[in-house]
Image: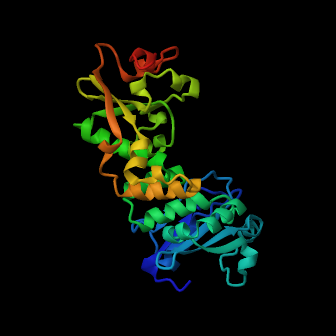
Amino acid sequence: MGTKPDNMIVLTNGSYVKFGQYSPQAALDGLSKETGCTTGKGTLLEVHAARTSPLWFVLYDKDSGKAVYGVVNKEKAMELLDKGVTDLKGVTSPELFSKIVCENIKADYLFAHAQAWDNKIKEKVFDGNEFRIVTIVNAAAKGAPADFMKGVLYHDHFCPGVTSGYLLANFLEREMPLRSASDSYFIISSPVWCKEDALQTLLNTTPGKSGMAVLPMDNQAKGKLLPEAKNLAGIYFRTDGKTKKSEALVLTFDFAKGAALSGLDKQQNLPEWEKKVKTVLWELDNLDKPELFITVLKRFELKEGETPMSYVQPGVNPLERLGLVK
C-alpha cells in the first residue's frame, strides 16, 4: 500500500479467535513489528469476537483511505501449525488467505459513493463485517478517546447505542461521582441496548462482579412506561463503602436530540448504514456534552435495610417499585 507507519491502523479479531488448540494471538506481535502499530498508539485494534469466528485482519491507510481485508485459511494455518512451521517465506498469500480484497473505506469517500458502497454491503465485500470495520477504523482515524475505543472494540462495532453508554458513564461520574475507593456503582440496565457494553468497560460494572443487573423490556413493557419515562436508560446506584448507604438516579437518554442537533433528522433518504456512520462521527465531537441527551428523571435515597440488590430480586419489578409504569 506504500503506507507510512504513522498513517496505518490495524484491525483484527486475532486476540479472541482459536484454531483448535492454537491461538493466533502471536500474529499481533508480528503485525506490530511490521507495521509499527501498537495498542499504546491506538493503532492496533483488537475487536471482540467469538473464538470460533473466522480470523481476519484489516490494514488501513489513513491518507488514502484504502483498506486491505484478509481472511486466514483456517485449514492451511492449522496444517502449518501442526508441522511447527514458523517461517512463512515459502507460503503464498493465496495459500494462507482464503480472501483478500482492497476497498476505500474513508468516511468522506463512502458518502460520496454511497450507492456503490450500499451495493458492496449487500454483496458482503468484507463477509458481513462492513459496518464494524468502517465505523471502528474511521473512529480511530478521527482520534476517538482510548477509553471510548475500549467500549467500541468490546461491542465489536461503533454505533449510537455504544456512544450512549459512554455519555451515560460521563454523566454519572459528573452527577454522582464515587468519592472513595470503597464506593461502588450498581446499575439496573433496563431497557437493554448497546450501552451496557460501554458501561461495563468504563465503570467495571459487570454482572459477574455484582455491578449490573440486565432487565430486558419488550415493546409491550415499554408501552407501560409513564410518558416522562419513555426514554428510560436505567437506574444507577452509588453505595458508600463505609456507611453502606445508597442513593440512586433514574436517567433517560433521548436519541432524537442528537438527530435534531446534527441535522440528520432532516436527511430522510439516506441508507441506514450512512445515517449511522454520520451519526456516530458527529457524536465523537460531543462526547463531553452528555447533558445534551441525558435527563435525571428521579433521584432518591434507599431506605434503612435496603440495598441496590433489593430492587432486582425474583418477583420484584424495580420500575413498578419506583412508580415509573402506568
Is residue 16 rendered to the left or right of residue 233? right
Q: Is residue 52 above or below residue 298?
A: below
The structure residue drawn at horizontal position 60% and vertical position 53%, both measured from the top left corner, is 49
* Color encoding of the figure: rainbow
* Residue placed most toward the observer, 133 or 23: 133
- Give the quarter of the figure containing the N terminus: bottom right
Q: Nearer the viewer, residue 222 or 153?
A: 222
The answer to whether 301 appears left or right of 13 in the picture is: left
Does 264 sit left or right of 114 as displayed?
Answer: left
- Determine the residue positioned at 40% across, 37% down: 253
Mark yes or no: residue 225 visible: yes
| Nearest to the observer: residue 74 or residue 302 | 302
* Place of residue 266 in the rendered image (x, y in percent of width and height, measured from the top left): 46, 51
Relative horizontal placement of residue 8, taking residue 131 as reference (left or right): left
x then y, percent, for residue 320: 44, 16
293, above or below 5, in the image: above
Seen in the picture, residue 281 relative to 243 is either above or below; the reply is below
Q: How many marks?
A: 0
Taking the spot 50% from the left edge, 78% from the top edge, the residue there is 35
Q: What percent of the width, then of the height, locates residue 200? A: 44, 42
Q: Which image quadrant for residue 319?
A: top left
Image quarter for residue 126?
bottom right
Residue visible at 58% across and 53% down?
Answer: 272
Q: Position of residue 323 (x, y in %)?
A: 39, 16
Residue 177 can be seen, yes or no: no
> Residue at the bottom extreme?
2
- In front of the other: 251 or 97: 251
